[in-house]
Amino acid sequence: MTSYLPAVAEELLRDIRKVYQETTQIPDDLLLALKFVFGPSALQALDLVDQRSVTCLSSPSGRKVFQFLLYAQVIGGSGHLYTCYASCHYCPCPAFAFSVLRRNDSLLCKHILAAYLCQAMGLSQHETVTDQQMSDILSGKAGRGT
Amino acid sequence: MADILALVFRHNNAQPRDLKNLSFASGPDRNTLPCMIVGERCGIKTSLLFLTAVTAAAELGVRVLFLTPSPIQSLSGPLKDSLANLDPDGLKKIKFMYPRSQEELLQDVASLHECVRGPAGPPSLLIVDGLEHYLGAGGRGPTAARGEDQSAAAHVAALLADTAAFLTQKLEERGEACAPCRVIVSFDVEWQGHTPPGDPSAQDPLLSVLDRYFSVRCTLDRDRNPAAPAPAAAGEPGDVWQIYFSGVGIADGHTSAQEDGSVLGQQWRLAIRPNGAMEFSPVSAESLASM
């Protein structure tokens, strides 16, 4: 997802990855930077990470890893299941539709940021699905807002 | 993906061409970002996409997946000529699919990852003709698109981009020269029978969403020359179009682009010849300056 984030955000995620690998903590200055760059989504995303809400799915075809993220299904606050793609920004949640697509005042929603953070911190849950199940998930036929 | 379009333009250039030199550009000038062809509602975009598919499959050996709402009923003059001169085996590299709804389109694209282990290998050019058909945009007005429509447009566009990224990875693993996987779609920009003035994205919420995912826009503007005695109908002999690329994948300044031969910033003129052939010619910097 590198090309879809501003350089400052990419740098911040790289720093978080590096520091977390060394200390298993995110220091205050990086948390503040996270809040500064991503706004209110940062705290909500960190909450999702703390709850281990992100699951990376993979199928035998290999559709699972593209540089940064696997297919991350994030359990939304309202109990909905959202699927975020690995190589570009899309989330079916209302915040993405409103703040990112419609008002264009956010870079991404808390689910996509949580997926980024989980990838950086190595805290994703991993599951394997069949190719057919992966197709249904990708198309939104399964695992989308249900 | 603008590189493959520019290659098709060069291949069908008004000037004499050397078919043996037909190949993708290499190096930093190669533009393989997802591309969206926009223009008023008419069949010229379908013809252009089909010509792209035929050229890519027969001349470059690229496996093409052509998704369109309905089968193409007839071929225009230049396509008939092209097909007559092409190796039939090359055309077997084009696979047509006819998803009738957004759900079917999503399912067809989402299942492409299942074919990567097959003997034929994955496609390296995904073409979607008439994207507006799948986004419920047929009767939309400037403010008609609601949040759900925008989210649906983002879903379709993101799935295409994500699938292309995955197929690119697989093509590179197989060591195929046609990597990366390219995506080209067409989208109508027209309300109530006329194309809006200015930047269509400012007035079309769906187009602004699609621009997020299709980094390069190839705009077809019909050349309505008031001096012409009798303007030709769209796509008919005598019809003339201006074609230009824009977007984040395009560098500023067409002069240097024309000099180095890359697709960046190039502008083209498309003329439908009396025999129906589509003929492209590059627009020089001098011509642009005098416009």
Image (spheres, grey):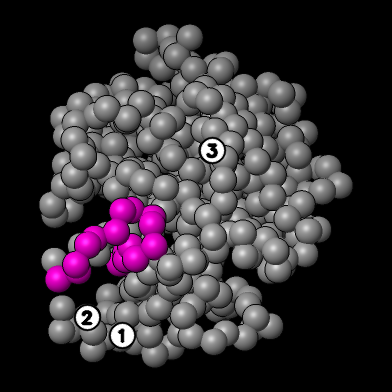
> Which quarter of the picture shows residue B273?
bottom left
Image point (86%, 47%), residue name: B119
Q: Which residue is labeled 1 in the image?
A: B284
Magenta region, residue range = B227-244
Q: Which residue is labeled 2 in the image?
A: B288
Looking at the rendered structure, the kind of residue marked 1 is Ser
**Depth check: A97 or B271 in front?**
B271
Image point (27%, 80%), residue name: B253
**In terms of secondary structure, what is the magenta stretch mainly?**
loop
> In the picture provided, is B131 more to the left or to the right than B115?
left
Q: CA distance from mark 3 to mark 2?
A: 34 Å
> Which quarter of the picture shows residue A125?
top right
Q: Which residue is labeled 3 in the image?
A: B68
- Counting other residues with Cα less than 10 Å from the Cα at mark 3, is it few (<14), some (14-19), or many (20 or more)? many
Q: Report whether mark 3 lies on the same chain as mark 2.
A: yes
> In the picture provided, is B27 more to the left or to the right than A36?
right
> In the picture provided, is B104 more to the left or to the right than B29?
right
Q: Position of residue A20 (x, y in %)?
A: 49, 45
Under circle 2, the secondary element is helix
Q: Is residue A64 magenta?
A: no
Under circle 1, the secondary element is loop
**Earlier-in-chain disc, 3 versus 1:** 3
Q: Farthest residue toward the right?
A: B119
What chain is tagged by disc 2?
A: B
Residue B255, placed above or below residue B76: below
Disc assigned to residue B58 = none
Under circle 3, the secondary element is loop
Residue B9, placed above or below residue B159: below
